[in-house]
Amino acid sequence: MPNPQQRRNKFEDVFIRIRDELIERMKAEKMPRKPSSGSIAHNLDYNVPEGKLNRGMSVVDSVEILRGRQLSDDEYFNTAVLGWCIELSSSVAICLLLVADDIMDQSILRRGKPCWYKLEAVENIAINDSMMVEGAIYHLLKKYFRFETYYVHLLELFHEAAYQTEMGQLVDLITTLDVDLSKFSLEKFACLHAQYKAAYYSCYLPVALAMRVCGVPETYTLNGQTIESYKLALSILLPLGEYGQVQDDFLDYAGAPEQIGKIGTDIVDNKCSWCVNIALSVATPEQRKVLDENYGQKDAGKETTVKALYDELRLREIYAVYEESAKERIDKLIQQIPEPEAGIDGGVLRRAVFTSSLNKLYKRTK
Protein backbone atom coordinates (compact mmCIF):
# COMPACT_ATOMS: atom_id res chain seq x y z
CA MET A 1 0.00 0.00 0.00
CA PRO A 2 1.65 3.28 -1.10
CA ASN A 3 1.93 6.03 1.49
CA PRO A 4 0.25 9.43 0.94
CA GLN A 5 3.35 11.02 -0.58
CA GLN A 6 3.84 8.11 -2.99
CA ARG A 7 0.19 8.39 -4.04
CA ARG A 8 0.60 12.11 -4.64
CA ASN A 9 3.81 11.57 -6.62
CA LYS A 10 2.10 9.02 -8.86
CA PHE A 11 -0.80 11.39 -9.43
CA GLU A 12 1.56 14.29 -10.20
CA ASP A 13 3.39 12.16 -12.79
CA VAL A 14 0.19 12.15 -14.85
CA PHE A 15 0.06 15.95 -14.67
CA ILE A 16 3.52 16.22 -16.25
CA ARG A 17 2.34 14.18 -19.22
CA ILE A 18 -0.88 16.10 -19.85
CA ARG A 19 0.88 19.41 -19.20
CA ASP A 20 3.36 18.63 -21.95
CA GLU A 21 0.52 17.58 -24.26
CA LEU A 22 -1.27 20.89 -23.70
CA ILE A 23 1.90 22.88 -24.35
CA GLU A 24 2.52 21.01 -27.59
CA ARG A 25 -1.05 21.69 -28.67
CA MET A 26 -0.53 25.42 -28.13
CA LYS A 27 2.65 25.30 -30.17
CA ALA A 28 0.80 23.50 -32.98
CA GLU A 29 -1.72 26.35 -33.05
CA LYS A 30 1.19 28.75 -33.71
CA MET A 31 0.08 31.02 -30.89
CA PRO A 32 2.35 34.03 -30.27
CA ARG A 33 4.66 33.35 -27.37
CA LYS A 34 4.29 35.33 -24.18
CA PRO A 35 7.23 36.01 -21.83
CA SER A 36 8.24 32.83 -20.03
CA SER A 37 6.88 34.24 -16.78
CA GLY A 38 3.40 34.44 -18.33
CA SER A 39 3.41 31.48 -20.71
CA ILE A 40 0.91 28.62 -20.80
CA ALA A 41 3.58 26.38 -19.26
CA HIS A 42 4.09 28.83 -16.40
CA ASN A 43 0.32 29.23 -16.03
CA LEU A 44 -0.19 25.47 -15.65
CA ASP A 45 2.78 24.95 -13.35
CA TYR A 46 1.93 27.96 -11.18
CA ASN A 47 -1.80 27.42 -10.74
CA VAL A 48 -2.61 23.74 -11.06
CA PRO A 49 -0.46 21.27 -9.06
CA GLU A 50 0.20 23.31 -5.92
CA GLY A 51 -2.84 22.63 -3.72
CA LYS A 52 -3.85 19.65 -1.62
CA LEU A 53 -5.11 17.87 -4.77
CA ASN A 54 -7.84 16.22 -2.69
CA ARG A 55 -10.54 16.71 -5.33
CA GLY A 56 -8.51 15.20 -8.14
CA MET A 57 -7.10 12.32 -6.13
CA SER A 58 -10.60 11.56 -4.82
CA VAL A 59 -11.57 10.46 -8.34
CA VAL A 60 -8.80 7.87 -8.31
CA ASP A 61 -9.57 6.79 -4.75
CA SER A 62 -13.28 6.44 -5.51
CA VAL A 63 -12.74 4.39 -8.66
CA GLU A 64 -10.43 2.02 -6.79
CA ILE A 65 -12.99 1.59 -4.02
CA LEU A 66 -15.87 1.04 -6.45
CA ARG A 67 -13.81 -1.45 -8.47
CA GLY A 68 -12.71 -3.20 -5.30
CA ARG A 69 -9.21 -3.68 -6.67
CA GLN A 70 -6.03 -1.94 -7.75
CA LEU A 71 -6.28 -0.24 -11.14
CA SER A 72 -4.23 -1.23 -14.17
CA ASP A 73 -1.77 1.34 -15.50
CA ASP A 74 -4.16 2.41 -18.28
CA GLU A 75 -7.13 2.57 -15.88
CA TYR A 76 -5.10 4.64 -13.45
CA PHE A 77 -3.93 7.08 -16.12
CA ASN A 78 -7.41 7.71 -17.52
CA THR A 79 -8.90 8.10 -14.06
CA ALA A 80 -6.10 10.47 -13.05
CA VAL A 81 -6.75 12.54 -16.20
CA LEU A 82 -10.30 13.07 -14.92
CA GLY A 83 -8.87 14.04 -11.55
CA TRP A 84 -6.56 16.55 -13.20
CA CYS A 85 -9.50 17.98 -15.14
CA ILE A 86 -11.01 18.83 -11.74
CA GLU A 87 -7.69 20.34 -10.62
CA LEU A 88 -7.49 22.34 -13.84
CA SER A 89 -10.96 23.67 -13.15
CA SER A 90 -9.87 24.39 -9.59
CA SER A 91 -7.15 26.68 -10.95
CA VAL A 92 -9.97 28.90 -12.24
CA ALA A 93 -12.47 27.96 -9.50
CA ILE A 94 -14.21 25.72 -11.98
CA CYS A 95 -14.15 27.52 -15.28
CA LEU A 96 -12.83 31.04 -14.75
CA LEU A 97 -13.60 31.73 -11.10
CA LEU A 98 -10.37 31.25 -9.14
CA VAL A 99 -8.53 34.04 -10.99
CA ALA A 100 -11.72 36.09 -11.23
CA ASP A 101 -12.45 35.52 -7.53
CA ASP A 102 -8.94 36.66 -6.60
CA ILE A 103 -9.34 39.81 -8.72
CA MET A 104 -12.84 40.62 -7.41
CA ASP A 105 -11.81 39.97 -3.80
CA GLN A 106 -8.46 41.72 -4.40
CA SER A 107 -6.80 38.69 -2.84
CA ILE A 108 -3.03 38.80 -2.45
CA LEU A 109 -2.13 35.17 -1.80
CA ARG A 110 -3.44 31.94 -3.29
CA ARG A 111 -2.00 28.64 -2.03
CA GLY A 112 0.74 30.45 -0.16
CA LYS A 113 2.11 32.53 -3.05
CA PRO A 114 1.09 35.69 -4.95
CA CYS A 115 -2.12 35.34 -6.95
CA TRP A 116 -1.56 34.72 -10.67
CA TYR A 117 -3.04 38.09 -11.65
CA LYS A 118 -0.57 39.83 -9.30
CA LEU A 119 2.41 38.78 -11.45
CA GLU A 120 3.76 41.65 -13.54
CA ALA A 121 3.81 39.62 -16.78
CA VAL A 122 0.20 38.51 -16.25
CA GLU A 123 -2.14 41.05 -14.61
CA ASN A 124 -5.49 41.19 -16.45
CA ILE A 125 -4.37 38.60 -19.00
CA ALA A 126 -5.13 36.20 -16.13
CA ILE A 127 -8.81 36.29 -17.13
CA ASN A 128 -8.02 34.99 -20.62
CA ASP A 129 -5.54 32.51 -19.14
CA SER A 130 -8.36 31.05 -17.07
CA MET A 131 -10.45 30.62 -20.21
CA MET A 132 -7.56 28.80 -21.86
CA VAL A 133 -7.42 26.40 -18.94
CA GLU A 134 -11.16 25.83 -19.25
CA GLY A 135 -10.65 24.92 -22.90
CA ALA A 136 -7.90 22.50 -21.89
CA ILE A 137 -10.37 20.59 -19.72
CA TYR A 138 -12.67 19.83 -22.62
CA HIS A 139 -9.75 19.06 -24.92
CA LEU A 140 -8.58 16.39 -22.47
CA LEU A 141 -12.08 14.97 -22.02
CA LYS A 142 -12.48 14.69 -25.79
CA LYS A 143 -9.05 13.16 -26.35
CA TYR A 144 -9.29 10.46 -23.69
CA PHE A 145 -13.01 9.74 -23.32
CA ARG A 146 -14.94 10.56 -26.50
CA PHE A 147 -15.34 6.88 -27.40
CA GLU A 148 -16.56 5.89 -23.93
CA THR A 149 -20.26 5.29 -23.38
CA TYR A 150 -20.19 7.71 -20.43
CA TYR A 151 -18.51 10.59 -22.33
CA VAL A 152 -21.65 12.75 -22.45
CA HIS A 153 -22.19 12.16 -18.73
CA LEU A 154 -18.69 13.50 -18.03
CA LEU A 155 -19.38 16.63 -20.08
CA GLU A 156 -22.69 17.16 -18.31
CA LEU A 157 -21.07 16.82 -14.89
CA PHE A 158 -18.39 19.41 -15.63
CA HIS A 159 -20.90 21.82 -17.17
CA GLU A 160 -23.30 21.44 -14.23
CA ALA A 161 -20.48 21.89 -11.73
CA ALA A 162 -19.48 25.11 -13.51
CA TYR A 163 -23.06 26.38 -13.47
CA GLN A 164 -23.54 25.58 -9.78
CA THR A 165 -20.25 27.25 -8.86
CA GLU A 166 -20.99 30.34 -10.93
CA MET A 167 -24.31 30.75 -9.11
CA GLY A 168 -22.45 30.42 -5.82
CA GLN A 169 -20.00 33.06 -6.95
CA LEU A 170 -22.91 35.34 -7.84
CA VAL A 171 -24.44 34.91 -4.38
CA ASP A 172 -21.03 35.53 -2.86
CA LEU A 173 -20.51 38.73 -4.83
CA ILE A 174 -24.01 40.12 -4.32
CA THR A 175 -23.56 39.96 -0.56
CA THR A 176 -20.38 42.05 -0.77
CA LEU A 177 -22.02 44.95 -2.58
CA ASP A 178 -24.00 46.30 0.36
CA VAL A 179 -22.91 46.02 3.99
CA ASP A 180 -26.21 45.05 5.61
CA LEU A 181 -25.97 42.19 8.08
CA SER A 182 -29.76 41.94 8.29
CA LYS A 183 -29.60 40.20 4.90
CA PHE A 184 -27.43 37.40 6.32
CA SER A 185 -28.74 34.18 7.87
CA LEU A 186 -27.62 30.62 8.45
CA GLU A 187 -30.42 29.47 6.16
CA LYS A 188 -29.06 31.61 3.32
CA PHE A 189 -25.58 30.27 3.98
CA ALA A 190 -26.73 26.64 3.99
CA CYS A 191 -29.17 26.75 1.09
CA LEU A 192 -27.28 29.01 -1.30
CA HIS A 193 -23.73 29.93 -0.39
CA ALA A 194 -22.45 26.53 0.82
CA GLN A 195 -24.42 24.36 -1.60
CA TYR A 196 -23.56 26.26 -4.76
CA LYS A 197 -20.04 27.39 -3.97
CA ALA A 198 -18.58 24.20 -2.49
CA ALA A 199 -20.75 21.11 -2.30
CA TYR A 200 -21.36 20.14 -5.90
CA TYR A 201 -17.90 20.92 -7.21
CA SER A 202 -15.73 19.86 -4.28
CA CYS A 203 -17.60 16.78 -3.09
CA TYR A 204 -20.17 15.53 -5.60
CA LEU A 205 -18.20 16.00 -8.83
CA PRO A 206 -15.23 13.70 -7.98
CA VAL A 207 -17.49 10.90 -6.76
CA ALA A 208 -20.02 11.23 -9.61
CA LEU A 209 -17.20 11.07 -12.17
CA ALA A 210 -15.91 7.89 -10.54
CA MET A 211 -19.43 6.42 -10.52
CA ARG A 212 -19.80 7.06 -14.27
CA VAL A 213 -16.40 5.51 -15.01
CA CYS A 214 -17.37 2.43 -13.00
CA GLY A 215 -20.73 2.04 -14.72
CA VAL A 216 -22.93 2.83 -11.74
CA PRO A 217 -26.43 3.22 -13.26
CA GLU A 218 -29.08 5.75 -12.32
CA THR A 219 -30.95 3.02 -10.42
CA TYR A 220 -30.23 -0.56 -9.42
CA THR A 221 -31.68 -3.15 -7.07
CA LEU A 222 -29.74 -4.71 -4.19
CA ASN A 223 -31.21 -7.07 -1.61
CA GLY A 224 -34.70 -6.19 -2.81
CA GLN A 225 -34.11 -2.46 -2.39
CA THR A 226 -34.16 -0.02 -5.31
CA ILE A 227 -31.25 2.42 -5.14
CA GLU A 228 -31.36 5.76 -6.95
CA SER A 229 -27.60 5.95 -6.92
CA TYR A 230 -26.89 9.54 -7.98
CA LYS A 231 -29.69 11.02 -5.88
CA LEU A 232 -28.44 9.03 -2.89
CA ALA A 233 -24.86 10.18 -3.50
CA LEU A 234 -25.98 13.79 -3.76
CA SER A 235 -28.00 13.54 -0.54
CA ILE A 236 -24.79 12.63 1.28
CA LEU A 237 -22.30 14.79 -0.55
CA LEU A 238 -24.24 18.08 -0.35
CA PRO A 239 -24.16 18.02 3.49
CA LEU A 240 -20.51 16.99 3.24
CA GLY A 241 -19.84 19.98 1.01
CA GLU A 242 -21.62 22.30 3.42
CA TYR A 243 -19.38 20.96 6.19
CA GLY A 244 -16.37 21.70 3.97
CA GLN A 245 -17.55 25.26 3.36
CA VAL A 246 -18.02 25.81 7.09
CA GLN A 247 -14.44 24.60 7.56
CA ASP A 248 -13.17 27.02 4.92
CA ASP A 249 -14.98 29.91 6.58
CA PHE A 250 -13.73 28.96 10.04
CA LEU A 251 -10.13 28.63 8.82
CA ASP A 252 -10.41 32.02 7.10
CA TYR A 253 -10.90 33.44 10.60
CA ALA A 254 -8.85 31.05 12.73
CA GLY A 255 -6.12 29.77 10.42
CA ALA A 256 -2.73 31.43 9.96
CA PRO A 257 -1.75 32.37 6.37
CA GLU A 258 1.18 29.95 6.42
CA GLN A 259 -1.23 27.23 7.49
CA ILE A 260 -4.09 27.76 5.02
CA GLY A 261 -2.06 29.19 2.12
CA LYS A 262 -3.80 32.55 1.87
CA ILE A 263 -4.65 35.64 3.88
CA GLY A 264 -8.21 35.45 5.16
CA THR A 265 -10.40 38.25 3.78
CA ASP A 266 -13.97 37.19 4.62
CA ILE A 267 -14.43 39.87 7.29
CA VAL A 268 -13.18 42.84 5.26
CA ASP A 269 -14.92 41.54 2.11
CA ASN A 270 -18.34 41.39 3.82
CA LYS A 271 -18.72 37.68 3.06
CA CYS A 272 -21.85 35.80 4.12
CA SER A 273 -19.69 33.32 6.01
CA TRP A 274 -20.60 30.75 8.62
CA CYS A 275 -18.64 32.69 11.22
CA VAL A 276 -20.54 35.95 10.95
CA ASN A 277 -23.89 34.14 10.76
CA ILE A 278 -23.11 32.23 13.95
CA ALA A 279 -21.99 35.47 15.60
CA LEU A 280 -25.24 37.16 14.56
CA SER A 281 -27.27 34.29 16.00
CA VAL A 282 -25.71 34.46 19.47
CA ALA A 283 -24.67 38.12 19.84
CA THR A 284 -26.22 40.43 22.41
CA PRO A 285 -27.58 43.78 21.14
CA GLU A 286 -24.31 45.43 22.19
CA GLN A 287 -22.24 42.81 20.38
CA ARG A 288 -24.47 43.09 17.31
CA LYS A 289 -23.73 46.80 17.24
CA VAL A 290 -20.00 46.02 17.19
CA LEU A 291 -20.56 43.76 14.19
CA ASP A 292 -22.67 46.33 12.37
CA GLU A 293 -20.00 49.00 12.87
CA ASN A 294 -16.97 46.92 11.96
CA TYR A 295 -17.89 44.05 9.64
CA GLY A 296 -17.30 44.44 5.90
CA GLN A 297 -14.92 47.41 6.26
CA LYS A 298 -11.56 47.66 4.46
CA ASP A 299 -9.86 48.49 7.73
CA ALA A 300 -7.37 46.23 9.52
CA GLY A 301 -8.30 47.66 12.91
CA LYS A 302 -11.99 46.89 12.41
CA GLU A 303 -11.12 43.40 11.19
CA THR A 304 -9.18 42.85 14.41
CA THR A 305 -12.20 44.09 16.39
CA VAL A 306 -14.47 41.54 14.66
CA LYS A 307 -12.00 38.71 15.30
CA ALA A 308 -11.81 39.72 18.96
CA LEU A 309 -15.60 39.57 19.12
CA TYR A 310 -15.54 36.10 17.54
CA ASP A 311 -13.14 35.05 20.29
CA GLU A 312 -15.43 36.60 22.90
CA LEU A 313 -18.37 34.66 21.46
CA ARG A 314 -16.28 31.44 21.67
CA LEU A 315 -16.57 30.69 17.98
CA ARG A 316 -13.80 28.10 18.21
CA GLU A 317 -15.77 26.12 20.77
CA ILE A 318 -18.98 26.44 18.73
CA TYR A 319 -17.11 25.19 15.66
CA ALA A 320 -15.70 22.19 17.54
CA VAL A 321 -19.23 21.17 18.57
CA TYR A 322 -20.49 21.74 15.01
CA GLU A 323 -17.74 19.58 13.53
CA GLU A 324 -18.53 16.58 15.72
CA SER A 325 -22.25 16.97 15.03
CA ALA A 326 -21.66 17.24 11.26
CA LYS A 327 -19.50 14.12 11.22
CA GLU A 328 -22.08 12.14 13.19
CA ARG A 329 -24.90 13.30 10.90
CA ILE A 330 -22.99 12.44 7.71
CA ASP A 331 -21.91 9.08 9.13
CA LYS A 332 -25.58 8.21 9.64
CA LEU A 333 -26.37 9.14 6.04
CA ILE A 334 -23.55 6.91 4.81
CA GLN A 335 -24.91 3.96 6.77
CA GLN A 336 -28.11 4.16 4.69
CA ILE A 337 -26.22 2.82 1.66
CA PRO A 338 -26.85 -0.93 1.21
CA GLU A 339 -23.43 -2.57 1.18
CA PRO A 340 -22.77 -5.04 -1.67
CA GLU A 341 -20.85 -8.27 -1.28
CA ALA A 342 -17.09 -8.24 -1.73
CA GLY A 343 -15.72 -8.98 -5.18
CA ILE A 344 -18.22 -6.93 -7.22
CA ASP A 345 -16.26 -4.85 -9.77
CA GLY A 346 -18.11 -1.53 -10.09
CA GLY A 347 -21.75 -0.94 -10.86
CA VAL A 348 -22.89 -0.30 -7.27
CA LEU A 349 -22.23 2.21 -4.50
CA ARG A 350 -19.96 1.44 -1.58
CA ARG A 351 -19.95 3.20 1.77
CA ALA A 352 -16.16 3.47 1.76
CA VAL A 353 -16.30 6.01 -1.07
CA PHE A 354 -18.17 8.44 1.15
CA THR A 355 -16.29 7.55 4.33
CA SER A 356 -13.05 8.29 2.48
CA SER A 357 -14.34 11.73 1.47
CA LEU A 358 -15.52 12.47 5.02
CA ASN A 359 -12.20 11.43 6.54
CA LYS A 360 -10.33 13.83 4.26
CA LEU A 361 -12.33 16.73 5.70
CA TYR A 362 -12.61 15.74 9.35
CA LYS A 363 -10.28 17.81 11.57
CA ARG A 364 -8.80 19.48 8.48
CA THR A 365 -6.48 22.38 9.35
CA LYS A 366 -5.66 23.77 5.90
Image: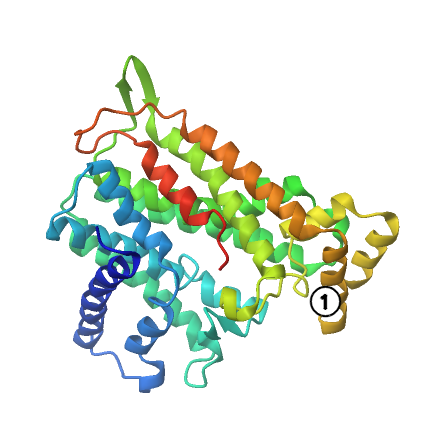
Give whichever of 288, 164 is nearer the camera: 288
Residue 241 coordinates in the image, percent (x, y): 48, 44
Residue 19 coordinates in the image, percent (x, y): 23, 69
Determine the residue positioned at 47% across, 51% down: 165
Residue that mark 1 sits on? 303
Determine the residue positioned at 45% across, 48% down: 361
Q: Quadrant of residue 293?
A: bottom right
Give whichever of 143, 113 is nearer the camera: 113
Residue 354 coordinates in the image, percent (x, y): 37, 38
**Where 71 sits versus 310, above or below?**
above
**Where 125 sits versus 166, above or below?**
below
Q: Amino acid at mark 1?
A: Glu
Q: Quadrant of residue 217?
A: top left
Q: Can you see residue 295?
A: no
Determine the residue positioned at 76% across, 54% down: 180
Question: Quick check: 222 left or right of 237?
Answer: left
Determine the residue positioned at 22% across, 30% down: 347
Give whichever of 122, 216 is nearer the camera: 216
For label 1, count other residues whose C-alpha is less than 10 Å away and answer few (under 14), some (14-19) or many (20+).
many
